[in-house]
Image (cartoon, rainbow, N blue to C red):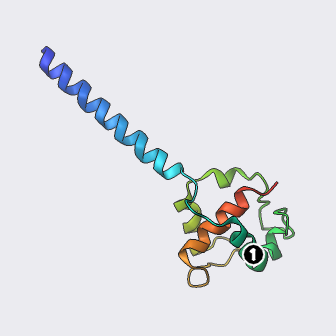
């Protein structure tokens, strides 16, 4: 392999790595402009019945949300779970507005 091809390959690898790192960083960003106070209101109205007011589950199939590792997932993954529901949790698509999903996520991530 000549020097030109090695340099070209190194540049491609650097560009790819930079783009991949930027994409992953964007996915890991917390909800921008999320309103945790509104998230608390929504959580108490729709989620606390199963997950408990403090995030500690009151139902056998509802996970504890306090410091839950599942909350480390990117916002879009969590929003999708809220939209579609899972196991015993009902879907909230059509119940919550788009920004309200992020508000709830912001609130729940700060439960102690």
Q: Would residue 105 appear left or right of 41 to someone viewing this image?
A: left
Please report the residue visible at 63 percent of the width from the left and 50 percent of the height from the top: 72
**One can see residue 1 in this view:** no
Q: Quadrant of residue 59?
A: bottom right
Picture residue at 66% right of the left edge, 61% below the top: 106
User: Could you tell me residue 5's position as x and y percent?
Assistant: 14, 22
Q: Please tell me which residue lies in front, 2 or 96.
A: 96
Does residue 34 appear left or right of residue 47 in this picture?
A: left
Residue at x 69% of width, y 74% of height: 89
Q: Is residue 2 positioned above or below 74 on the image?
A: above
What is the number of callouts on the image? 1
Image location of residue 24, percent across then percent down: 46, 45
**Residue bearing mark 1:** 41
Side of 56 relative to 21 (left or right): right
Residue 75 on image: x %, y % = 56, 59
Q: Compared with residue 93, is residue 8 higher up or lower down, i.e. above or below?
A: above
Q: Is residue 64 left or right of residue 73?
A: right
């Amino acid at each position: 392999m000549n020097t030109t091809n090695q340099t070209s390959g190194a540049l491609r690898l650097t560009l790819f790595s930079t783009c991949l790192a930027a994409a992953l960083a964007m996915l890991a960003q917390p909800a921008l402009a999320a309103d945790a106070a509104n998230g608390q209101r929504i959580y108490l109205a729709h989620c606390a019945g199963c997950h408990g007011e403090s995030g500690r589950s009151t139902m056998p199939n509802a996970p504890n949300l306090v410091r839950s590792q599942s909350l480390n997932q990117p916002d879009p993954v969590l929003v999708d779970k809220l939209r579609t529901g899972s196991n015993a949790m009902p879907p909230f698509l059509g119940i919550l507005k788009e920004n309200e999903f992020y508000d709830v996520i912001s609130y729940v991530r700060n439960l102690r």
